[in-house]
Amino acid sequence: MLTIFLQAAPAGGSSPMMLIMMGVMFVGFYFLMIRPQMKKQKQEKKFQEELKVGSRVVLTSGLHGRIAQIHDDGVVIETLSGKLKFEKAAISREFTAARFGDKATATADKKEVIETEKK
């Protein structure tokens, strides 16, 4: 059994084929693991920067609420039990978009247009 392993290994050290295989594995890891994670982080950062007062959100803990205030170091979430301060990173998604999809944004846009017309 030992002779099979010794025959499989090149005697002169690392071969160019082994280096090519390592390169292909690194490129595969980059496109399958690293790049999607970086893209997800970029989307989360963009979402957290675009938060507005009055948006209904869901936190990573499962808490549902409405954004009452936005500060540099966090946000104040208004719930049925009162107001609580959280970090922006604790907000996982916007509730209305996740629950109702495009209908909620279209309805919200229509309401904003009607309110501006009334003024």
Image (cartoon, helix red, strand yellow):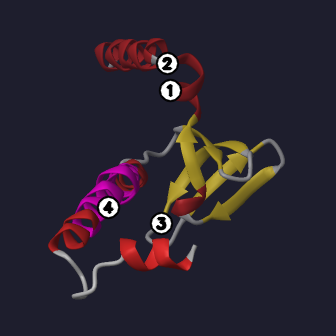
- Tags 1 and 2 touching, CB below 8 Å: yes
* CA neighbours of label 3 inside 10 A, class few (<14), some (14 to 19), many (20+): few
Tell me the SS state at disc 3.
loop
Three-letter residue code for mark 2: Gly
Q: Depth check: 89 or 53 in front?
A: 89
Residue at 31% across, 55% down: 28
Question: In the rendered image, which quarter is residue 115 located in?
Answer: top left
On residue 25, the disc is 4
Three-letter residue code for mark 1: Ala
Instruction: Identify the residue under disc 1.
Output: 97
Q: Depth check: 58 or 113 in front?
A: 58
Instruction: Identify the residue under disc 2.
Output: 101
Q: Which residues are magenta?
A: 22-43
**Precedes in sequence: disc 3 or disc 1:** 3
Q: Distance between the Cα atoms at labels 2 and 3?
A: 28 Å
Three-letter residue code for mark 3: His
